[in-house]
Image (tube, rainbow, N blue to C red):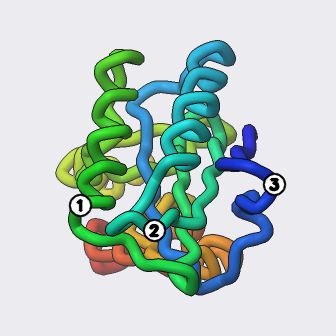
């Protein structure tokens, strides 16, 4: 796992941001090689150094986890993101997509663990996998919809399928 620190010494790492920090999680549709992850780190750090809303600098940091997930956290106690600053973040992530040839912005896949491997599938395919018994309610899924850093820290991001919104994709007799 790479951990990013945006900006100068006044900018925190994700571990130093408060639990109520706003969160965006983007999943890459393939694991990134070390040099690609390094590029994500460098370019995201540079982006966050200059990230602002209505001329006010935003206090944000990022993590790169499991070779798949870009996590951006924003301490809204200093300043909240505006529509324009969120658009700028999305433009940054889409630029990374183009440069690396990966999908990051598509939030529709279901991300899950298959042993130690991280996989993703369409919701329809995940439902089929659940029906066939290839995944179950105990399958660990990643909930990219968590919105606060505290949710990530307390295990609301990586959890059994029956403990998240993913349970709706499981057969009714799911464990």
Classed neighbour count for the residue bearing mark 3: other residues with Cα under 10 Å, few (<14), some (14–19), many (≥20): few
Q: Is residue 138 above or below residue 102?
A: below
Q: Is residue 42 above or below residue 133?
A: above
Q: Which residue is mark 1?
A: 84
Query: Gap in Å between the C-alphas at discs 3 and 1?
Result: 26 Å
**Side (left or right) of 5 relative to 67:** right
Q: What is the secondary structure assignment of the residue under circle 1?
A: helix
Query: Gap in Å between the C-alphas at discs 3 and 2?
Result: 17 Å
**Side (left or right) of 158 relative to 171:** right
Query: Gap in Å between the C-alphas at discs 2 and 1?
Result: 12 Å
Pointer 2 and pointer 1: residues touching (CB < 8 Å)? no
Q: Which residue is mark 3?
A: 9
Q: Residue at x 50, y 59 (%)?
A: 141
Q: What is the secondary structure assignment of the residue under circle 2?
A: strand
Q: Which residue is mark 2?
A: 56
Q: Residue at x 70, y 45 (%)?
A: 4
């Amino acid at each position: 796992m790479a951990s990013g620190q945006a900006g100068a010494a006044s900018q925190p790492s994700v571990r130093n941001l408060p639990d109520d920090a706003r969160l965006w999680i983007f999943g890459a549709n393939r694991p990134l090689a070390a040099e690609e992850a390094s590029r994500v780190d460098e370019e995201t750090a540079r982006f966050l150094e200059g990230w602002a809303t209505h001329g006010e600098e935003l206090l944000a940091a990022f993590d790169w986890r499991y070779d798949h997930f870009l996590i951006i956290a924003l301490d809204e106690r200093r300043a909240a993101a505006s529509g324009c600053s969120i658009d700028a973040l999305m433009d940054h992530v889409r630029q990374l997509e183009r440069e690396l040839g990966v999908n990051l912005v598509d939030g529709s896949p279901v991300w899950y663990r298959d042993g130690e491997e991280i996989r993703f599938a369409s919701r329809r395919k995940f439902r089929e996998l659940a029906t066939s018994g290839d995944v179950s309610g105990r399958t660990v899924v990643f909930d990219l919809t968590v919105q606060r850093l505290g949710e990530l820290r307390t295990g609301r991001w990586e959890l059994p399928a029956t403990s998240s919104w993913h349970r709706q994709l499981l057969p009714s007799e799911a464990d």
